[in-house]
């Protein structure tokens, strides 16, 4: 399989504390790859390091064959990685539509680096296409597009956070706990959207506490324990793994 992301001998430390300890894994192009594990296992740290928020202590992070380890958040986003963080982090002082437009920043930077006779028109067209894609994925955002983002419900804010991440037309979408704190009916909506985003060709790296739901939509999964990978396999196999069931699925 063509790997869009390869993580090799990857370690991250906070001072004397080693949060991630020499892990290796790949993300195949077009796949949904899930990272499971208890709180403090190193899941969010792994995502934040891939997207450039944290600098790795050792190892390589190859994105489309190029080592991005230690590069800036901006350059990694410009390369085609979009990170939807835990906690949504929407821009409260802006409307829904303005939040989405902020998400086009790295996309516009990529387009500006390519030869074009009419970059401004191209960006305007891409903006419209990206907005329509997000509104197709989350119709409620179109209805609320003129509202202040702060007036949205928790579920709607999560949809907005994911939608903003999609506005840059990423090759790899990183999602950190997208269903956290949501009612069950909204969790179903979010997982359905993730599946559809994948079906449209976007590769997804997903951290989730909801292990059962995640394994139902993922292609591959790995489990982190204390900064190390304790198991990994096709998601369809792990969903029936007795160790995982006892530890995370509550059966």
Image: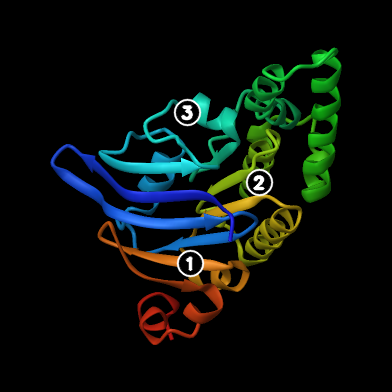
Left or right of residue 9, residue 142 in this image = right
Residue occupying image coordinates x 51% and y 24%:
74
The residue tagged 2 is: 153
Q: Which residue is mark 1?
A: 221
The disc, 3 or 1, on the residue closer to the chain's N-terminal end is 3
First-in-chain label (3 vs 2): 3
Which structural element holds mark 3?
Answer: helix
- Where is the N terminus found, in terms of image quarters? bottom right
Horizontal placement of 66 versus 137: left or right? left
Q: Position of residue 66 (x, y in %)?
A: 48, 37
In this rendered view, identify the residue nearer to me: 186 or 224: 224
Q: CA distance from mark 2 to mark 1?
A: 30 Å
Rendered image: mark on residue 73:
3
Q: Is residue 96 above or below residue 64?
A: above
Residue 118 occupies which quadrant of the picture?
A: top right
On the image, the x and y values in percent for residue 196 come to 74, 58
Query: Of the residues tagged 2 and 1, which is closer to the observer?
Result: 1
Instruction: Give the image location of residue 181, x and y in percent.
Output: 52, 56
Residue 184 image-quadrant placement? bottom right
Q: Are marks 2 and 1 in contact (CB under 8 Å)?
A: no
Q: CA distance from mark 3 to mark 1?
A: 25 Å
Q: Nearer the viewer, residue 148 or 173?
A: 173
Rate crowding at label 3 as few (under 14), some (14 to 19) or many (20 or more) other CA atoms within 10 Å.
many
Query: Could you say which is closer to the camera, residue 170 or residue 249?
Result: 170
């Amino acid at each position: 399989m063509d790997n869009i992301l390869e993580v090799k001998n990857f370690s991250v430390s906070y001072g004397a504390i080693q949060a991630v300890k020499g892990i290796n894994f790949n993300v195949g192009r077009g796949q949904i790859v899930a990272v499971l594990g208890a709180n403090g296992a190193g899941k969010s740290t792994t995502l934040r390091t891939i997207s450039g928020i944290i600098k790795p202590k050792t190892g390589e992070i190859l994105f489309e064959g190029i080592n991005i380890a230690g590069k800036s958040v901006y350059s990694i986003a410009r390369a085609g990685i979009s990170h939807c963080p835990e906690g949504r982090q929407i821009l409260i002082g802006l409307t829904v539509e303005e939040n989405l437009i902020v998400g086009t920043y790295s996309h516009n930077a990529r387009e500006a680096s390519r030869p074009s006779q009419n970059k401004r028109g191209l960006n305007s067209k891409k903006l419209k296409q990206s907005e329509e894609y997000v509104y197709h994925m989350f119709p409620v955002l179109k209805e609320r597009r003129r509202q202040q983002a702060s007036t949205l419900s928790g579920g709607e804010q999560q949809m907005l956070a994911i939608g903003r991440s999609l506005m840059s037309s990423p090759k790899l979408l990183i999602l950190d706990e997208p269903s956290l704190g949501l009612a069950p009916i909204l969790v179903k909506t979010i997982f359905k959207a993730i599946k559809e985003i994948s079906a449209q060709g976007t590769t997804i790296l997903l951290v989730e506490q909801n292990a059962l739901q995640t394994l139902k939509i993922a292609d591959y999964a790995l489990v982190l324990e204390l900064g190390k990978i304790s198991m990994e396999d096709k998601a369809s196999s792990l969903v029936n793994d007795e160790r995982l069931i006892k530890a995370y699925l509550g059966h």
